Image: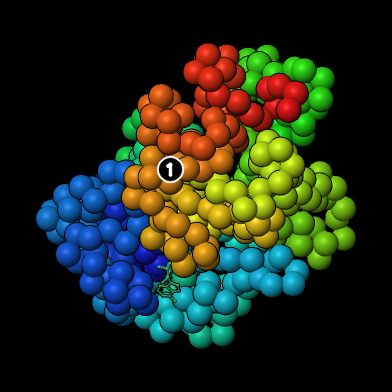
Amino acid sequence: MKIAVIGTGYVGLVSGTCFSEFGHTVTCVDKDPKKIDALNQNIMPIYEPGLDSMVAKNRAAGRLHFTTDLGTAMKEAEAVFIAVGTPSRRGDGQADLQYVFAAVEEAADHIKDYTVVVTKSTVPVGTGARIKDILSAKLNASLFDVASNPEFLREGAAIEDFMRPNRVVCGADTERAQAVLRELYRPLFLNETPVLFTSRETAEVIKYAANAFLATKISFINEMADLCEKVGADVQEVAKGIGLDTRIGGKFLHAGPGYGGSCFPKDTRALVSTADQHKVPMRIVRSVVEVNEERKRAMADKIIRACGGSVDGKKIAILGLTFKPNTDDMRESPSLDIIPALQAAGASVAAHDPKGMEEARELLENMEFCDDPYDAMTDADALVILTEWNQYRALDLGRVKDLLKAPLLVDLRNIYGRANLADEGFKYVGVGRCPE
Ligand code: NAD
């Protein structure tokens, strides 16, 4: 099949590349010429493990193309996927759909034969219907269908997630559109991936319900961590103890500095906003959002308490800036709240991140970015682990202790154990594992 993908961000680029890996002919379009120029030289605009080699392979096979010209991309395409950003709108937290609607308007001008317009972007329920209205104003109804095919990939494991998903959700109201989507995902039928066909509205809700549920697990375990710290229990053992129950499941039960990234914060806010529009209370998700906002402030306070109640004039070394490992994405990372809060309390900050520093430099001010994690620690009063990158799991603790002014490790991802750190002569502060 021949398809076009609008937007070559984390979702559009990975989806387009993986569709070409399935054997389809894919043209990815972006309005950012720098991204397209780079991609045409096999330079990836994002960090995603395994992506560069898959792009190179499919470009060489003539199945994957990059252009800024939507008309070329859509020529003979049976489906056009919209994978542009849907950031939070200021004020009400609803998803800002301006990029989606702009892409739809542009695509409408190039629809000559029957085409399925598919939203891969995360869009509030009802958006598909609005897209249909936009297209209906310009095109004969027989020329298009609008479908919803939300994406569930995780940054850092995006290719694996796309190639071997837990499920695929296709919201399409006509058999013709369903047939196009079925054909596109046919390679996944071979390994028996569940492909769910639903109404468009149901598919749109599934995406938000999934993200809100995962965010709920995180806020839930973070509140359990607070209780554990007060009563001398260990949240990691609590998570294991509940997670082994298959009705609960062990994933997304890691206590930490709160969820961040380009999806959970904005999607939970957007869901609350949609609920408000429809006068549905949505109390659980509302409090998940509140708990997470509060969490980031609480983590800065935790670091300050660990430093004896003040960080004024102290140097804090931070390891990890991105919201999770294996990505360069800094969007809504907890570091963006925690570091300014420490600076406001008088601390100077030196940080290292394996992939996120280029973007972090644009977002964080008056701090030192170090190419080596050990450089960040030199003469610091405390070492704080914010992101659980693998390379921080096996630090040379003897060297760390020699470099730090005081042997204090605040481990907001619980990657070290209290006992072995105490043996090494550290004061160790984890999350939800011991009284502070
Ligand atoms: P992104 O910001 O990384 O990329 C969006 C791209 O779209 C940009 O390169 C931008 O230049 C391009 N673009 C915008 N308008 C365009 C237009 N009219 N024509 C051509 N290109 C255009 O976004 P992302 O992280 O890939 O997210 C895209 C959507 O997928 C969002 O709705 C997001 O919620 C959803 N989603 C993201 C993830 C994730 O992990 N990032 C996972 C699942 C779903």
How many numbered badges does the structure rendering display? 1
Measured from the top left, where is residue 172 in percent x and y?
A: 54, 56
Q: Pick whichever, 178 or 245, lies toward us.
A: 245
Measured from the top left, where is residue 339 in percent x and y?
A: 59, 54
Mark 1 lies on residue: 378
Question: Which secondary structure, mark 1?
Answer: loop
**Which image quadrant is residue 406 in?**
top right
Instruction: Name the residue rendered at 81%, 25% in the picture.
Output: 230
Q: Pick whichever, 7 or 431, lies toward us.
A: 431
Looking at the rendered image, the quarter that the N terminus falls into is bottom left
Measured from the top left, where is residue 21 in percent x and y?
A: 25, 47
Looking at the rendered image, the quarter that the C terminus falls into is top right
**Which image quadrant is residue 97 in?**
bottom right
Mark 1 crowd level (few <14, some 14–19, many ≥20, 10 Å Cα): many
Residue 387 visible to an observer of this rendering: no
Instruction: Name the residue rendered at 35%, 57% in the picture.
Output: 46
Vertical position of residue 382 compared to residue 370: above or below: above
Measured from the top left, where is residue 243 in percent x and y?
A: 64, 20
Q: Is mark 1 within 8 Å of ligand 1?
A: no
